[in-house]
């Protein structure tokens, strides 16, 4: 699908089913396309390019397991987009090597200012890029899967964000990652090695815990509490 394929017309809204065999959706293909109500992506899709759905009116999207990368601003300003499903995102690669989601990249500001309410990241995804979900005002819950790095301002301005599930893989929380998340009152991580400046500045944080497992893999954890004000400064856990 090439750039501006659907334009920004005011035609009656339609449902789009993209054909099997399609591997790439080009930049701006559905950008500001008011005529498009929903889009069904094919099982062969590998790449969603920059601004592909920027400003479109779609309400939900299922990212097929074949998709490897969602580029910058792909779903930015999709205010009606409430539901994003990553197909087979919760499967383990060791157990289901031919069925697991292949997504490894979510680009900068990919879902910025969208209406997404919950997100459960697939297990092959290890990095959330800068501003990827910034200013998602309806986002309430995140499950990080096997994500290791949360980029700068990744969830800044998500005012309703309340629940975070980390699965013990997150190692880096970058500058401003959860800035101005006013509803976020409690977080707990293990294995975190670096927390950037103002990572939780302006949040509602009252309880911030890091459980640090020792190198000998014994069946206990060292427990370190950090007051909410500490989270606004650069902190390194060794």
Image (cartoon, rainbow, N blue to C red):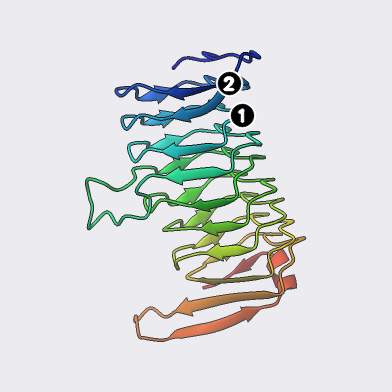
**Residue at coordinates 51% horizontally, 29% vertically from top-left?**
38
* Residue 67 in the image, given as x and y percentages of width and height: 37, 36
* Residue 97 in the image, given as x and y percentages of width and height: 22, 50
* Residue 81 in the image, given as x and y percentages of width and height: 59, 38
Q: Which residue is mark 1?
A: 57
Quadrant location of the N terminus in the rendered image: top left
Q: Nearer the viewer, residue 197 or 123?
A: 123
**Residue at coordinates 69% horizontally, 56% vertically from top-left?**
160
When the figure is inspected, residue 206 is found, relative to residue 40, above or below; the finding is below
What is the crowding at mark 2: few (fewer than 14 residues within 10 Å), some, or many (at least 20)? some
Q: Nearer the viewer, mark 2 or mark 1?
A: 2
Asked whether the beta carbons under mark 2 and mark 1 sit within 8 Å of each other, the answer is: yes
**Residue at coordinates 52% horizontally, 38% vertically from top-left?**
60
Real-space CA distance between mark 2 and mark 1, rounded to the nearest whole angstrom: 9 Å
> Where, by quadrant of the figure, is residue 214 drawn?
bottom left
Q: Which residue is mark 2?
A: 13
Q: Residue furthest front?
A: 12
Q: Nearer the viewer, residue 75 or 59?
A: 59
What is the crowding at mark 1: few (fewer than 14 residues within 10 Å), some, or many (at least 20)? many
**Residue at coordinates 57% horizontally, 31% vertically from top-left?**
58
Looking at marks 2 and 1 on the same chain, the residue that comes earlier in the sequence is marked by 2
Q: Is residue 41 left or right of residue 71?
A: left
> Where, by quadrant of the figure, is residue 109 drawn?
top right
């Amino acid at each position: 699908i090439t750039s501006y394929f659907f334009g920004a017309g005011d035609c009656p809204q339609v449902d789009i089913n993209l054909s099997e065999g399609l591997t790439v959706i080009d930049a701006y293909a559905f950008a500001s396309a008011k005529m498009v109500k929903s889009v069904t992506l094919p099982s062969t899709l590998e790449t969603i390019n920059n601004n592909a759905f920027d400003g479109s009116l779609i309400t939900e999207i299922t990212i097929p397991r074949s998709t490897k990368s969602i580029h910058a601003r792909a779903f930015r300003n999709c205010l009606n987009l409430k539901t994003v499903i990553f197909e087979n995102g919760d499967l383990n690669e060791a157990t289901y090597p031919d069925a697991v989601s292949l997504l490894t990249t979510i680009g900068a500001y990919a879902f910025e200012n969208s209406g997404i309410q919950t997100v459960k990241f697939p297990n092959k995804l290890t990095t959330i890029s800068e501003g990827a979900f910034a200013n998602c005002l309806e986002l309430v819950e995140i499950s990080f899967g096997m994500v290791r790095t949360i980029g700068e301002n990744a969830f800044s301005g998500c005012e309703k964000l309340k629940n975070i599930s980390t699965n013990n893989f997150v190692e880096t929380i970058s500058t401003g990652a959860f800035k101005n998340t006013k509803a976020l009152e409690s977080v707990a991580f293990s294995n975190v090695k670096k927390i950037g400046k103002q990572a939780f500045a302006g949040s509602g944080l009252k309880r911030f815990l890091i459980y640090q497992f020792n190198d000998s893999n014994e069946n206990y954890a060292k427990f370190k509490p950090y007051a909410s004000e500490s989270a606004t400064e650069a902190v390194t856990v060794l």
